[in-house]
Amino acid sequence: MNREKVVFGFFIILALTLNVGFVLGDIDNPAHHEVFELFLALVVSLICTVLKFGDRSHLGALLLATSLVADLQLIAAAVVWAYAEQISTLGMTDGTMASIVSLAAGALVANIISVVLLVVESASIRR
Amino acid sequence: MNTLLYILLRRLRLPLTVLIGVYAVSVLGFVLIPGLDDQGQPWRMDFFHAFYFVSFMGSTIGFGEIPYPFTSAQRMWTLVCIYATVIAWLYAIGAMLSVLQDKGFSRLLSTRRFAHHVRSIREPFYLICGFGTTGRDVVTGLEQQGIKSVVIDIDPSRIDALELEQYSLPVVGLCADASLPENLDLAGLQNPCCLGVLALTNDDNVNLSVSIASKLLYPKRIVVSRSENDTTTANLYSFGTDLVVDPFKQFAEYLGLAAHNPQKHLIVDWLIYPQHRPIASTYKHQSGRWILCGYGRFGRALAGTMRAEGTEITIVDPHIDSAISEESASVTGIGTEASTLIQAGVEGAVGIIAGTGNDADNLSIIMTARELNPRLQTVVRQNLDSNELIFERLKADFVMNPGRTIASRILAHLRTPLLAEFLDQAMALNEVDARELIQRINRLVGDDQVRTQAFTLGEDTPAVKEWIESGQVLTLRSLLKSPADRTTDLKCLALLVKRGDHYWVEPGELTELHMGDEILFSGRESDLYQQRWLFENARTLNYVVTGAEPHYGVLSYFFKGTPH
């Protein structure tokens, strides 16, 4: 068993599960979406990106790309959230919540691709 | 993306993960720990403010406790976070700096810079593997001709030395194993501007693999290789290496020449080696017994040459076995003590060769031998360049520097490949002819440096090509006349004409020239320069051959009707 692979797989799958957890629920209902979960999803996604650094293979490059996409979407979601809570005079509205969740849903797709690639890579190793 | 970035990122994985982790935990802590607002009501920091606070705290900017003064619990958490973030930053920055300073990383960096530089070369250059005495001399020689060099050597100190040398043309060097094709590739083996590859390392196997790689990729490109044994030499020639120099053999031949045939030695010296020696320096050759100190690889090669010439030798070496003593007279010892030299019969000898691998020993041998027999001819081998000054002061009849000798030979070959063929022919001359050749060259050149240039009649000599193809006869005499005034001769001498496999050494002035002939001239630099006009300018050639002044312009056309 390769410890490095365990850590790597752990973080990638954790990024996906946290992301799913955040997105689940009515898209425009703020009560269904926990800010902590978004925060953790973003942190884990960033760690995933760093872990994917420095892999020269084609698959490695693709993995890094999916991670960067997820980061971008989640950071956008976080910025929108901060804007709604701190700057906007209206506060958090249903519409804003919907856009935050849809951004996170985009990140979810990227994370799913990431996990699929991981599975494909593991399946192609025959030992 | 390039390798460097990958390595940097790979090494920074852990520091960056730690940094992200510490920040995440800090932010989370501030969000979770309850505080009090300005009214004394319970209040919780949101993620936005927590991230803001941690950002300026972690970077030690410190705007204070905002938006409300902290509670004791928050301050305690701040304390933890301050140390944690500072340590995480120090770790990350330290890791990055250590990667940048890492030997392997800086080597990669310099390799990249080197490869980039080589790729951007757009003028002709030579690729030189091995930067020892020979390599350095070749680089300097090429530089004087205005040709760039790219150097590979496995010894980092030599590459450092290369950077310190003051070359007017930038010489780039790479510290790498030249036997690996990828390194050769980096050094411009595939660059179309590469004129040739010179394998001058002191490892035969490396030279062999360099030569093979070059010949396989570009069969027409010049390859010169150093080789220390006959098997490698034969191997190198078998796949078409253009010139193979065996340092010991070549040097022994040269030294042997100095000892038993001063005239031919002077010819070689004049044509190949840059320093000019006046004709008076050829001492009268005395036949007699020579003492050879040092019987290593070099001494063996030298003894072979001298025996072949029928010169009697006495060998002085610390390790004399029965095989040596059977072949020739020998004495055990270094030769630095008077007793050993007397035992070797220094009083009755005509010359002594101090050919050990140790400069101090060589100097000592010459000094001791001179005291015992002042009329002795002295030949000394210089191993290290740094001892130049002492060897100059020694005033021995000949100071021989193996690395330099070979470098001059290689340079001469690169400049005019025909020269080597001429020298092969010249070695077969008898003593009278050799002396006559020296006198002829000396009359033309005087005390100036002797230069040589070679022409192949064809595309490179448009004037001659046009002339011969028009069906007219061209003799060698025409090519030795001054383009300024055809009644005076250029101070040049035709040394060799080569047609197919036939050679004419010192060809007569009436020799008729054909297309494809190769001609070697020698003379003063300025005269050789003028001579080039005859080969390139049809009008000048016409004037020199027929004496007709070149007519051109509208007026002459008008009056004469035909332009020349």
Image (tube, rainbow, N blue to C red):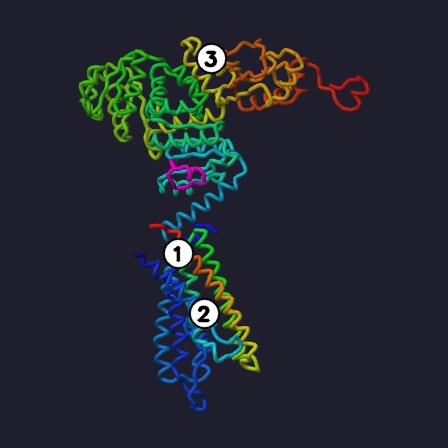
Residue B95 appears at what percent x and percent y?
37, 60
Q: How far apart in space, not on screen, are marks 3 and 2 (Cα)?
A: 96 Å
Pick whichever of labels 1 and 3 is earlier in the sequence: 1
Chain of the residue on which disc 3 is drawn: B
Q: B359 or B93, which is in the foreground? A: B93
For the N terminus of chain A, give its image quadrant.
Answer: bottom left
SS type, badge 2 = helix
* Residue B180 on the magenta span: yes
Looking at the rendering, the stretch of residues picked out in magenta corresponds to: B172-185
* Residue B373 on the magenta span: no
Q: B425 or B405, which is in the foreground? A: B425
Is label 1 or label 2 in front? 2
Would you say B467 lies left or right of B253 here? right
In the rendered structure, find residue B351 and report the number of the disc placed on it. none
Check if mark 3's residue and mark 2's residue have beta carbons within 8 Å: no
Q: How far apart in space, not on screen, are marks 1 and 2 (Cα)?
A: 29 Å
The residue wearing badge 1 is B10
The residue wearing badge 2 is A20
Residue A2 appears at what percent x and percent y?
32, 57
For residue A81, above or below residue B531: below
Would you say B157 lies left or right of B466 here? left
Check if mark 1's residue and mark 2's residue have beta carbons within 8 Å: no
For badge 1, the amino acid type reads Arg
Chain of the residue on which disc 1 is drawn: B
- Labels 1 and 3 positioned on one and the same chain: yes
For badge 3, the amino acid type reads Leu
Chain of the residue on which disc 2 is drawn: A
- Labels 3 and 2 positioned on one and the same chain: no
In the rendered structure, find residue B437 and report the number of the disc placed on it. 3
Residue B88 appears at what percent x and percent y?
37, 67
Residue B433 appears at what percent x and percent y?
44, 9
For residue B555, above or below residue A72: above
